[in-house]
Image (cartoon, rainbow, N blue to C red):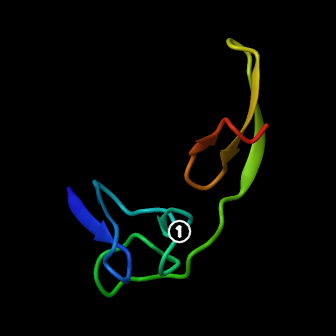
């Protein structure tokens, strides 16, 4: 497990592997990374998903896989 932080140090997460460029700090607009490996922050790329079991329509980021069930 590694501690990945944003550039300003306000937020941190524990992860096994690398973080995605769309997950990060809203304050400094940098993704979570090891010190010295900071990249450019990208916004989520949403795709519409239909859940057959529950009959729900929602959006999911195609990069990191996070769900946004409040959007639709």
Disc 1 secondary structure class? loop
> In the figure, is residue 18 to the left or right of 72?
left
- Figure disc tally: 1
- In the displayed structure, 43 sits above or below 16; it is below
> What residue is shown at x 30% (from left), y 55% (from top)?
15
- Residue 43 spot, x, y in % from top left: 65, 67
Seen as rendered, the residue at the extreme top is 53
Residue 26 against residue 19 in the figure, above or below: below
69 with respect to 36 (left or right):
right
Residue 48 figure quarter:
top right
Q: Residue at x 62, y 72 (%)?
A: 42
Give the quarter of the figure containing the C terminus.
Answer: top right
Residue drawn at x 69%, y 38% is: 70
Relative image position of residue 60 (x, y in whole percent) = 67, 43
Classify 10 Å Cα crowding around label 1: few (below 14), some (14-19), many (20 and above): some
Instruction: Identify the residue position indicated by label 1 in the image.
Output: 21
- Reply above or below: 35 against 47: below
The extreme bottom residue here reads 36
Q: Position of residue 45 (x, y in %)?
A: 71, 58
For residue 68, what is the image quadrant?
Answer: top right
Quarter of the image holding residue 1? bottom left
User: What is the x, y in percent for residue 35?
Assistant: 28, 82
Residue 20 placement, left or right of 57? left
């Amino acid at each position: 497990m590694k501690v990945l932080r944003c550039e300003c140090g306000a937020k941190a997460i524990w992860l096994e592997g690398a973080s995605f460029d769309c997950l990060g700090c809203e304050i400094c607009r940098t993704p979570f990374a090891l010190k010295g490996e900071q990249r450019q922050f990208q916004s989520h790329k949403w795709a519409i998903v239909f859940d057959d079991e529950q009959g729900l329509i929602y959006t999911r980021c195609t990069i990191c896989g996070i769900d946004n069930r409040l959007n639709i």
